[in-house]
């Protein structure tokens, strides 16, 4: 009985001392997990702005040959749609020939030494990749010659400028803040034209010329205003 009383008194004494000891202990810091990093939207390439560039490639169909030139234009991006206007001027070395419809046993040879395009553009962009279609007016500078099929001698020649239309499509990729590279295909519809020739004998005759051609070019553009990064 005496031992039970001693144990009970010891427990009561420890219970009284424990709160005092707990009060003397310093408050322990509470650690929290760091907040997650902020979510940042991916940057979007903006195709809006004035640009200038160079191009080079090949013409083929009724005439064939190489070409090199330049272009200047302006594009405006609205959402993922892109609209624009472009002027292009090229030196060319296109030539072709066919049997003359007016001069028997003669060959009609035509050459294009320059052409120009004024076209509108509509496209769809996925960040720095632009797919587009274009269409507008075309003009060509031409020389026509009639040569004898038998002797190769020139029978007549004349120069003229022809108006037509152009349609095309292309893809362009922005590879640096101000630079983009692309590939473009165009078809030039140059209407059949009656061309008058004066022969060496002083005779004026008319021959009908057909001169449509296709154009495939590689293009490099520089945009003056840097792309805007939208978030």
Image (cartoon, grey):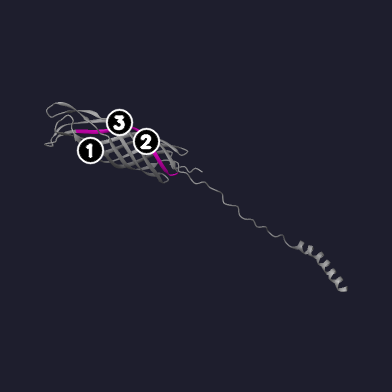
- Taking the magenta stretch, the answer to whether it contains residue 140 is yes
Residue sitting at x 43%, y 41%:
125
Secondary structure under badge 3?
A: strand
Neighbours of disc 3 within 10 Å: few (<14), some (14-19), many (20+): some
User: Depth check: 23 or 112 in front?
Assistant: 112
Secondary structure under badge 1?
A: strand
User: Residue 73: which numbered mark, if any?
Assistant: none
Q: Quadrant of the N terminus?
A: bottom right
Q: Identify the mark nearer the N-term, 1 or 3.
A: 1
Q: Which residue is mark 3?
A: 164
User: Residue 95: which numbered mark, if any?
Assistant: 1
Where 182 sits versus 143, above or below?
Answer: below
User: Depth check: 116 or 172 in front?
Assistant: 172
Residue 158 placed where, x, y %? Answer: 19, 31
Q: Which residue is mark 2?
A: 134
The span from disc 3 to disc 2 (Cα, nearest Å) is: 15 Å
Bounds of the magenta segment: 127-144
Lateral position of residue 118 relative to residue 145, left or right: right
């Amino acid at each position: 009985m005496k031992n039970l009383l001693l144990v009970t008194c010891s427990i009561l004494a420890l219970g009284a001392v424990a709160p005092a000891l707990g009060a003397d202990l310093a408050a322990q810091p509470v650690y929290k997990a760091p907040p997650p990093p902020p979510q940042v939207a991916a940057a979007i390439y903006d195709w809006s702005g004035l640009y200038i560039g160079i191009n080079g490639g090949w013409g083929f169909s009724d005439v064939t040959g190489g070409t090199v030139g330049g272009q200047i234009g302006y594009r405006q991006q609205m959402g993922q749609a892109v609209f624009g206007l472009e002027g292009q001027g090229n030196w060319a070395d296109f030539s072709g020939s066919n049997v003359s419809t007016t001069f028997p046993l003669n060959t009609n040879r035509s050459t294009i030494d320059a052409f120009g395009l004024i076209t509108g553009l509509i496209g769809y962009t996925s960040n720095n990749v632009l797919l587009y279609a274009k269409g507008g007016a075309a003009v060509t500078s031409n020389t026509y010659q009639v040569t004898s099929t038998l002797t190769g001698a020139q029978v007549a020649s004349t120069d003229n400028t022809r108006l037509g239309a152009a349609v095309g499509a292309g893809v362009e990729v922005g590879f640096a803040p101000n630079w983009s590279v692309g590939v473009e295909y165009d078809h030039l519809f140059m209407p059949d034209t009656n061309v008058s020739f004066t022969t060496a004998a002083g005779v004026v005759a008319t021959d009908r010329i057909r001169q449509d051609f296709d154009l495939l070019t590689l293009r490099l553009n520089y945009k003056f205003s840097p792309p805007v990064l939208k978030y």
